[in-house]
Amino acid sequence: MYKVCFAIFCLEYKILAGLDAAIEDGVDVISLSLGFGHSRSPLYNDTIAIGAYSAMEKGIFVSCSAGNDGPGSGTVQNGAPWILTVGASTTDRKIRAVAVLGNGAEYEGESAFQPTNFSRKLLPLVNGKYCDLLHLIDVKGKIVLCDTKRGLYREQIARTVKNAGGAGMILMNNKEGGSTTLAVYDVFSMTQVSYKDGQEIINYMKSTSTPVATISYKGTKIGDKHAPTVGYFSSRGPCLQSQGILKPDIIGPGVNVLAAWPTPIEGETTSASASSSSTFNILSGTSMSCPHLAGVAALLKSAHPDWSPAAIKSAIMTTADVVNLGNDPIQDETLERADLLAVGSGHVNPSRANDPGLIYDIQPEDYIPYLCGLNYTDDQVSVIVKKKVHCTSSIPQSELNYPSFSIPKESSAQTYTRTVTNVGEAISAYTVKVSGLKGVEVTVNPKILKFTVLNQKASYNVTVKTLDLTGHSQGCIVWSSDRYSVRSPIHVFPHISVI
Ligand SMILES: *[C@@H]1O[C@H](CO)[C@@H](O)[C@H](O)[C@H]1NC(C)=O
Ligand SMILES: *[C@@H]1O[C@H](CO)[C@@H](O)[C@H](O)[C@H]1NC(C)=O
Ligand SMILES: *[C@@H]1O[C@H](CO)[C@@H](O)[C@H](O)[C@H]1NC(C)=O
Ligand SMILES: *[C@@H]1O[C@H](CO)[C@@H](O)[C@H](O)[C@H]1NC(C)=O
């Protein structure tokens, strides 16, 4: 571990010093759970991209958090193509706190604070709106419905309700929060419910003059069929600095992650339960998902010591899961099918990643024509690669040998070439299938890739012809053999200028 942040400050020169120290120490994998909010800096002005380039050049894998600025579009950070950019998803474990209403309806929310002696009797239910002006209403001994509001932390809201004498609180998500509920070790009897459930609770309150409710604590439940879903906060693509690379790359566990914590978490809670001296905590954020992927990369690196960072990344991306435990396409916080700009290649599947069949490899020097293609000056490219560069050749961004595709819509047909390396079975043949793309015609050539030895390379072309210049189009290219399925998502987007 390299300490680069002090109090709330993460100074850029300290991050670079930390990365240099890690490189010097000969680490194999770096997990970097930090970023500078939603960065609009070009790569030559992006400290983490510059530091990570040096690490990648030395064969070190770098996993970074995608950021917690979602669900708005274009909020992803750490989007350099030599970095694995990790979004956050839920797991199938919920720490249930059910809101029970007088009409018998039950809404499954979450809280990691699970009192055993909470009233089973229905208590009066009042709407505290944002719960910042509770002196205006009588909440004593009642359950208070509160709406989440930007700027107020859950703990502040809970404390206000508690101090006003409330018996318990139902915290409903705003629209943006959708279905993402957090299991926080709260200071108070409460539950957090989804936006949709919150609206139904409001409707119930409108339907009766004497609304009542209680909270029923159910402890840990495993098996949520919606999991993994994208957490509402998980930053979304496109990466404004390089729209020709699909970001984030992958999602991994980052909502309600239980982990060791340096200090007891009880803080000022009144409940002096045995867990109050606990040095575990539950947190959510892409800072939690990034180290999961760093761990997966470490496993792959030990199983395949000769794989480059790009090869490890390819293995993780082309084998990712695209369906949830209920076998439906992975959803976002709205419980609608998640966009590629939210999930990238999908949800990490470590065992499949260990045996991907084919990989899309990239050597450090391959990034130079890519950077020149971003129209950076020689000096700007030199800042990133830390040696004198003359841009003699350049490629469009989408031409980098990346394991996913992000392709701008152009009026004429465009062809992109990819090269795969056989790391599966020596004698093997793969056939291609393109699916899901609307408004564009995608042709792959050749349609069969044959291999006779391991580490043999083969190239194919993808030609994209735009039929309809408006709107995004999403789908995938899958190369399949008897044993393997190597999947690359394709995002085809109408060109948008960077503001
Ligand atoms: C480079 O980054 C600095 C701060 O880190 C910022 O003030 C400056 O505007 C950035 N320049 C460009 C071209 O983005
Ligand atoms: C539940 O138990 C805690 C700890 O013993 C106590 O502080 C609290 O007042 C109790 N709550 C109720 C509703 O009885
Ligand atoms: C770089 O400049 C060329 C020529 O002006 C232009 O066609 C291309 O879109 C530019 N690329 C980027 C990434 O801005
Ligand atoms: C792929 O495209 C390149 C450049 O457009 C071309 O030279 C090459 O022959 C193509 N290969 C195949 C298999 O179509």
Image: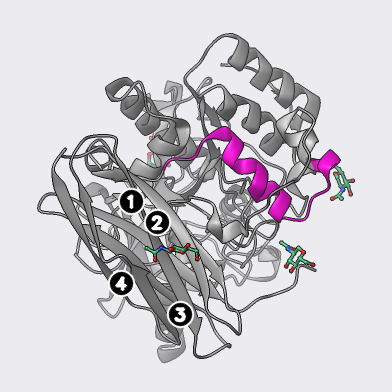
Of tags 3 and 2, the one toward the viewer is 2
The secondary structure making up most of the magenta span is helix
Q: Which element type, helix, strand or loop, lies under badge 4?
A: strand
Q: Which element type, helix, strand or loop, lies under badge 3?
A: helix
Distance from Cα at disc 3 to Cα at disc 2: 33 Å
* Sequence-wise first label, 3 or 2: 3
In this image, 493 relative to 377: left or right? Answer: left
Distance from Cα at disc 4 to Cα at disc 3: 40 Å
Residue pointed to by mark 2:
345
Ligand 2 within 8 A of label 3's CB?
Answer: no
Whether tag 4 and tag 1 are in contact, CB under 8 A, the answer is: no
Q: Which element type, helix, strand or loop, lies under badge 1?
A: helix
What range is drawn magenta here? 361-380
* Sequence-wise first label, 4 or 1: 1
Distance from Cα at disc 3 to Cα at disc 1: 39 Å
Q: Amino acid at mark 1?
A: Thr
Residue pointed to by mark 4:
434
**185 or 491, nearer to the observer:** 491
Residue pointed to by mark 1:
318
Residue pointed to by mark 3:
199
Looking at the image, how many numbered discs can be counted on the residues?
4
Q: Amino acid at mark 2?
A: Ser
Mark 2 residue crowding within 10 angstroms, few (<14) / some (14–19) / many (20+): many
Magenta stretch encompasses residue 373: yes
* Sequence-wise first label, 4 or 3: 3
Whether tag 2 and tag 1 are in contact, CB under 8 A, the answer is: yes
* Sequence-wise first label, 2 or 1: 1
